[in-house]
Image: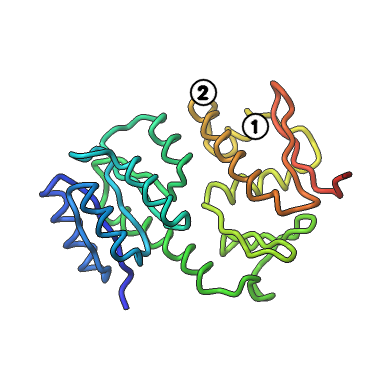
Amino acid sequence: MPYKLLFVEDEKDLGNVVKQYLEFMGFSVIWHTHAKNAYDDYIADPNFHLLLIDIQLPDYDGFELAEKISKVNNQQAFLFLTARNEKKDRIYGLKIGADDYINKPFDIDELVLRIKNIIRRNNGVNNSLEHPAETTPVQVMGDLLFYKELLKLSFPNQKAVSLTLREAQLLMYLYENRNRILKREEILLHLWGENDYFLGRSLDVFISRLRKTLHYSAEVRIENVYGVGFIFHVAPVDN
């Protein structure tokens, strides 16, 4: 059975081209030009592997659509398509849980690759056991297990949690520099190759999301060092 995509794009020429190409690549595509119609279709049948959402839509914007759908299913994967090349938009998209973000004009083959990467991550998590097979490459971090290839964290007596690629990269870098003060500038330069205000905001989003994930752990935590950076603690936490 082909992977099913909900595609929301009001530019009809672009929508037709993308829909036809994705179908040629083996995907099943439901295309809407308005957010309301897409939302109604999703409510009627929420079984989509991925949502491709344009931000600027005629009735209400793609951010609002994604938030409405996330309230129905907070595990739904989605990526944004946009002609607005603004970092604040990317930061907001990340805050509401976007798996990826691609600017127009884009290469259609790059879009297909990103779609496949997201589905592979999520499908690998959904179709696996709550705790992956022991043969999967794993990094032990205190009382949690990080499965690099699956982008998945496993905690004692809890369901495994999936990460985005950037969250996984950040987690691994923090772990490699565990139990020491790691400056924000170091992290930004390592992950993005530059250090500016908007990337710093993006980093804060990723740190916040990792913190929420790590609340399952009794031995791993991220501590703020005001005005400097963070310490990734991997040790028993005193109660």
Quadrant in which residue 104 is drawn: top left
Q: How is the image coloured?
A: rainbow
Q: Which x, y percent locates residue 37? A: 21, 52
Q: For residue 186, which numbered disc appears in the image?
A: 1
Say left or right for 209 vs 1.
right
Q: Give residue 191's quadrant in the image.
A: top right
Q: Give the camera-side residue of 64 and 186.
A: 64
Instruction: Give the position of the N terminus as an image quadrant.
Output: bottom left
Q: CA distance from mark 2 to mark 1?
A: 14 Å
- Kind of element beneath mark 1: helix
**Near-viewer residue (36 or 117):** 36
Picture coordinates of residue 117 (x, y %)?
43, 60
Taking 87 as reference, is 21 above or below it? below
Say which amino acid is labelled 2.
Tyr
**Residue that carries the numbered disc 2 in the rendered image:** 197
Compare residues 21 and 209 and report the one nearer the observer. 209
* Residue 18: % across, % down: 20, 56
Which residue is drawn at the image coordinates 36% and 59% (left, top)?
50
